[in-house]
Image (cartoon, rainbow, N blue to C red):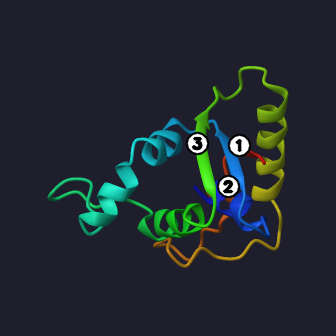
Amino acid sequence: IMAAIVGLKALNAPCRVTLYTDSEYVANAMSQSWVQRWRAHGWKRTKTQPALNADLWEELLDLCAQHEVTFVWTRGHAGDPENERCDRLARQARNAPDLPPDPGYPSTSHRLGPLFGATRLKI
């Protein structure tokens, strides 16, 4: 989720974007309107089960409203050169010493790094 957010934030004008992700969860949640449904139901996946990372989903939805975004799932670690490069960059970013804390994460000992996934934008 965070990788998609960071990628979309990098755009400085409304764009038509194809966002490739190796997260089936992110691709399906966005392209099958799960996230819109969760938001419409007060960030609940079911009557009793909350949607996790509602703060990040909300931010992603807001960013997608500024662009024409198509989410495409790509299999991770399957030899796609761009996906492999994104994965390497995400792992490097995760280990950076100056990552900000994630205010939406319950523990203050965790940083944004583990939230990054292999995502690339095609504009």
Q: Which mark is residue 71?
A: 3
Q: Quadrant of the N terminus?
A: bottom right
Where disc 3 sits, the SS reads strand
Give amino acid for label 1: Ala
Name the disc covering residue 118, or none: 1
Three-letter amino acid code of the residue under disc 2: Ala
Return the mark for residue 3.
Answer: 2
Numbered circle sitting on residue 93: none
Label 2 residue SS: helix
**Tag 3: amino acid:** Phe
Dot in front, 3 or 2: 3
- State yes or no: discs 3 and 2 in contact (Cβ < 8 Å): no
First-in-chain label (1 vs 3): 3
Task: Say above or below: 104 vs 44.
Answer: below
Q: Nearer the viewer, residue 95 or 29?
A: 29
Percent position of residue 84, x then y: 80, 32
Mark 3 neighbour density, 10 Å: few (under 14) some (14–19) many (20 or more): many
Q: Residues within 10 Å of mark 2 (few under 14, many from 20)?
A: many
